Amino acid sequence: MIALRRPLAALSVAFLLACGGDSTGPVAGTLKINFTTPNSGEDAGVLLLLTAPAVPVSAAAAAGLQLWGAPVTTTTAKLVVTGTLSTGTIATLQVDDVNKVSQYSVSVQSVAAGSGGGFVLRPLSGYSTTITK
């Protein structure tokens, strides 16, 4: 009987080590929408197209900016961020699983520069966005 217990115990330990410790389940958290502009500090608004694998829990603008189009209720949404835009994080998304970051995309649809109380559309050359953890 003792001879049978040792292999069974070793098998149980191996099984626990193989299954435990490295969780691959969803990890809720924050994703950042990062913006690159060739006109840092001179842009006043950007229209973004967000595509996500699941509807974000919430969306918020970075400090000093305003976000329009939230709450996001679909997996494809248009968002507008206004204020004095510079290169860097312009908004954040609260999501159910930050490990799916590669499945999120955001693209610049249009950019406006403030001009005497009005907005002037800019050519899109030099603008880009990324989503990161």
Image: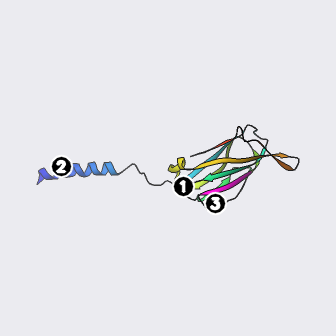
Q: Nearer the viewer, mark 3 or mark 2?
A: 3
Mark 2 or mark 3, which is nearer the start of the sequence? 2
Q: Position of residue 68 (x, y in %)?
A: 72, 57
Residue at position x 59%, y 55% from top? Answer: 94
Taking the view exactly as shown, the residue that stands out farthest to the right is: 116
The residue that label 2 is drawn on is 7
Which of marks 1 and 3 precedes in the sequence? 1
Q: Position of residue 120 (x, y in %)?
A: 82, 46
Give how far across and how far down residue 71 sits, in percent: 65, 61
- Image quadrant occupied by the N terminus: bottom left
2 is higher (above) or lower (below) than 73: above
Residue, disc 3: 72
Q: Residue at x 52, y 55 (%)?
A: 28
Stretch in magenta = 73-81
**What is the C-alpha distance between the residues marked 3 and 2?**
54 Å
SS for dot 3: loop
Amino acid carrying mark 3 in the image: Val
Q: In the shown orientation, is residue 10 left or right of residue 105?
A: left
Which structural element holds mark 1? loop
Neighbour tally class for label 2: few under 14, some 14-19, many 20 plus, Cα within 10 Å: few
Residue 20 shown in magenta: no
